[in-house]
Amino acid sequence: MKLYMFQCGILKTKKHLITMGRGIGQPFDVPVPFFLIKHPRGNVLFDTGNALAVVNNKAKHWGTVVESYDPVMTKDDYVVAQLAKVGVKPEEITHVIFSHLHLDHAGGTGEFSNAIHYVQRTEMQYAYMPDFFQAGAYIRADFDKPHLNWHLLEGYQDDCYDVLGDGKLQIVFTPGHSPGHQSLLVKLEKWGPTLLTGDSVYTEEILEEDVLPGLVYSPPDAVKSIKKMRDLRRVNGVRIITGHDPIAWAKFNLAPACYE
Ligand SMILES: [Zn+2]
């Protein structure tokens, strides 16, 4: 099993939108990660980055969100172009797992017609009818694709969902940032167990200190999910890959390099 890391450009934002109450107004550029796991039983994508439409007309596709989170990407950063770098065609993707359906995670939805698409039911429902403070983060044109093969997961009832039947890829329910947020535990042989956290923990500052993410649906759930990750690290030695940390992210080798 191999883990590949990709970056779909950056978001130009402000520090306080990443760490609540800290760095008010400070410019802060964050990466937009997504991941591929090559496993003998399939090619599994975790998140899909920004939509291709962002390249040429971000204000039209994302609306006023660009005033807070300004995406900078080229067409070569798009998920399909990036997968080509490691020789994977869209039709060869067997599973797409969405941490959640925010615009920088669900932009490539619809490119992988042979795949089963895993998302939490609560996330899918909320994406259609979000509260005002999350409305800008869900672009219906990205995820409203009912013809796809969707597998809706049921929160804690499906916690540690075993994706491929061998225990090596497990979906861990980590709500808080959004109602149906989930993370992916990848049990790599050499690098060790690794948790891809989506947006449930943006940065190492949030992982290590008691600070909330700048955008959060439920603070109590977010705090419990972060505690769950700390426990996984302490008890099981799980490596935590944060979601939008420019410093931590720069230490990883992006594809075509991989981790085994
Ligand atoms: Zn998000």
Image: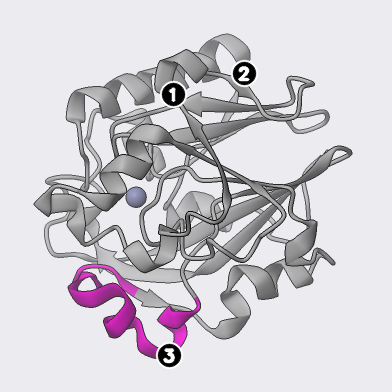
Residue at point 27%, 58% (across, down): 137
Please state which amino acid type lies under the numbered disc 2: Gly
Query: In the image, which residues are magenta?
Result: 52-70
Q: Secondary structure at mark 1?
A: loop
Tell me which amino acid carries mark 1: Glu
Query: Which residue is identified by label 1?
Result: 154
Q: Which residue is mark 3?
A: 56
- In the rendered image, residue 53 lying in the magenta stretch gets the answer yes
- Give the number of the disc on residue 136: none
Q: Is residue 187 visible?
A: yes
Q: In the rendered image of this protein, does residue 220 appear above or below residue 16? A: above
Q: Earlier in the sequence, mark 1 or mark 3?
A: 3
Q: Picture coordinates of residue 45 (x, y %)?
A: 65, 50
When the figure is inspected, residue 38 is found, relative to residue 105, above or below; the finding is above
In 3D space, how far apart are the residues under numbered discs 1 and 3 (Cα atoms)?
37 Å
Q: Going 28% across and 32% down the picture, which residue do you hit? A: 176
* Neighbour tally class for label 3: few under 14, some 14-19, many 20 plus, Cα within 10 Å: few
**Disc 2 target residue:** 237
